[in-house]
Structure formats: structure tokens, C-alpha cells
Image: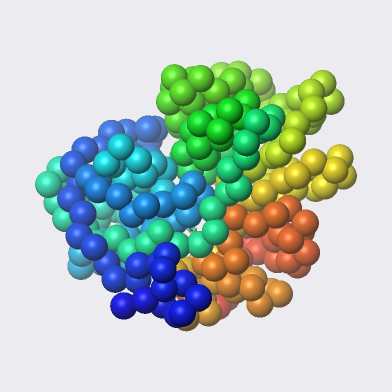
Amino acid sequence: MTCCSEHQHSINTEPQTFEITDFWEEAKDIRTFVFKGTLGSKPGQFCMLWIPGVDEKPFSIARDYDGEIWLTICKVGPATEKLFDMSKGAKVGMRGPFGHGFTVAKKKKIVLVGGGYGTAPLHFTGKRHAENSSDVTMIIGARSADLLIWVDQCEKSGFRTLVATNDGSRGTKGFTTHILEDLLKKESVDLVQTCGPEKMMKAIAQMCTEKGIECEVSIERYMKCGFGVCGQCVTESGEKMCQTGPCVKAQKALSYSDFGVYHRGPEGQKVEW
Ligand SMILES: Cc1cc2nc3c(=O)[nH]c(=O)nc-3n(C[C@H](O)[C@H](O)[C@H](O)COP(=O)(O)OP(=O)(O)OC[C@H]3O[C@@H](n4cnc5c(N)ncnc54)[C@H](O)[C@@H]3O)c2cc1C
Ligand code: FES
């Protein structure tokens, strides 16, 4: 089945079965799961992961190349708890890839800013930029050193990697926005892309817009179908984030009155970020 004529060449709405071939801890309650195969994803896109007996939930693609799909998942509720109980060899369903990913730039100076599990899809994005001869700086933030993820992979991939922790236990004490602000004073940057807490992304979107620097953010909204049918993921301006997003230009994100303020839960109720 395909979702509509517009997308029939690119979107697979039927779940495919994948086996968990490996997993490891990134930090407390954050694990990267490896599945053999491909969805043909672009960086910044997401999949709907069906966890048997519980639910189907959206997750960003952390890697989709060399015959492996990686998802970096934070344990927060029933579906992710069940996934963390599953062993190697267990089977799940996956639909996708869905949504618009990040722009991949050629021969540009790029800064990627990740917070929490938002860092995982940015590594995939950075790989694609680097393959296109772009220069990649990654800024990664967390509350403390033990909650940082993907720092080693970013360093191994040759990205200049800068770290911020709220408590100063590693890297700069403070926020990723402090590092970005300093960097933009000293260096010229063509494009900033960010994925993480929405308040962080809003501050980055405002900073870049004021300085006239191109910027893209990845917006999370409650998602059910993943391809534009259920209407669950609309912003206050009525745009479906599973289709228009999750990656959108900063100016567009800043035009949404709910961006960085609140999102809607499963029953449509407002939930503050
Ligand atoms: C585009 C997109 C990409 C995402 N990428 C990742 C990722 O890479 N890693 C990761 O750990 N999490 C990611 N999430 C969030 C992930 O979908 C939720 O953490 C997950 O659905 C929680 O399910 P649960 O049953 O474990 O917890 P629940 O108790 O059901 O939910 C915990 C919280 O997760 C959020 N959530 C729950 N269901 C959904 C849903 N259907 N759509 C959106 N948010 C939901 C809500 O804010 C809720 O308060 C992403 C969400 C979106 C929309
Ligand atoms: S998740 Fe159904 S329309 Fe976006």
C-alpha cells in the first residue's frame, strides 16, 4: 500500500519485519539498537517502530547505511520499556522512512547542534555532509557528562566535536547555545542544523535568523500514522509535522505559535515543553 499519489514512489506505509541484531548502552536509559537491512532513509527522517504487543512509535533514524539501521532510544514509557526488555534476535516491525530530512550541503561550513537523543540523527547528517566535502562541527549538550551520547562516534567520524554540560562535568559549563554563540562571533558558518529540546532549538533558530545564517530544526509532535492521514501531528498553524517536517527551516518554525512553547498529547491536550 502507498499513502497517496504524491508519495507513492518514496513512502512505504506497510511494516517490514526487522530483527534486533545488536544493541548497547549510550547512557543511562539510552540505548542504540541495530537492525539488519535498510529503509533507504535520508538523515533527519524517521520511522514508525512497532513493538509487538504494545504500540507503534516514531523514532529518528540514527543510521541507515552499510546494511544496518540504527535507532538511539530513550526509555520513557511502556513501548520503550518493552523494547529494552527484548533480546538480540527479537523481531519488530518498521514503516518508513517518513518526513522531510535535513538538507545535505556541498562544500559548506556546517554546524550541527544536538541535545539528548537529538544528537543521533545529526551524526548521520554530518556523515552525509562530510561525504559532500563540507566541513562539520558538532556541538553536543547534556545535563552532565554521563548523559552525553554519540561524542565518540562524532570524533571518530572526524567532526570537530564540542561539548557542553549544565554542571561542567565535561566540556564547557553551560548550554550548547553558549558554544554556538561564541563560535558564530569568531567564524563564518553557512548552515546550522539542530535536533533536541524545543526550547534549545528555538533559541538557536532565533540566533541564526538574527545573524542571517541559514538554519533548520527538527520538530517533534505526537505522531500516529506518520504519513499525513490521522492529523495527530499538526502544529497550531495546521501543518502536519510528519510531512512538512520533522526538519523545517528556522523561519518556518518560528512562524508556528506553539514552537518552543507547547505540543499536543494523544488526546489533543496542550503539553508545555
Ligand atoms: C519525529 C520523531 C522522532 C523521534 N525520535 C526519537 C528518537 O530518536 N529517540 C527517542 O528515544 N525518542 C524519539 N521520539 C520520541 C518517541 O516517539 C517517544 O519517546 C516514544 O513514543 C515514547 O513511547 P513510550 O510508550 O515508551 O512512552 P509514553 O509513556 O507513551 O510516552 C512518553 C512521552 O513520549 C512522547 N510520545 C509518546 N508517544 C508518542 C508519539 N506517538 N509521537 C510522539 N511522541 C510521543 C510524549 O511526549 C510522551 O509524554 C521521536 C518522536 C518523534 C515525533
Ligand atoms: S502522524 Fe498522522 S498526520 Fe502526521
Q: Nearer the viewer, residue 78 or 14?
A: 14
Q: Nearer the viewer, residue 247 or 118?
A: 247
Q: Position of residue 122 (x, y in %)?
A: 52, 39
Q: Position of residue 22 (x, y in %)?
A: 21, 38
Q: Nearer the viewer, residue 160 or 222?
A: 160
Q: Answer above or below: position of 104 versus 51.
A: above
Q: Answer above or below: position of 66 versus 86.
A: above
Q: Residue at x 41, y 43 (%)?
A: 62
Q: How is the image coloured?
A: rainbow
Q: Residue at x 46, y 50 (%)?
A: 42
Indicate the quadrant where residue 111 lies.
Answer: top right
Q: Position of residue 23 (x, y in %)?
A: 25, 38
The answer to whether 183 appears left or right of 131 in the picture is right
The answer to whether 104 appears left or right of 50 in the picture is right
Q: Position of residue 189 (x, y in %)?
A: 75, 31
User: Is residue 47 visible to us here?
Assistant: yes
Q: Residue at x 37, y 32 (%)?
A: 26
- Rendered-image quadrant of the N terminus: bottom left
Q: Residue at x 67, y 44 (%)?
A: 200
Q: Answer above or below: position of 170 versus 236.
A: above
User: Is residue 164 visible to us here?
Assistant: no
The answer to whether 6 appears left or right of 171 in the picture is left
- Rendered-image quadrant of the C terminus: bottom right
Indicate the quadrant where residue 139 lies.
Answer: top right
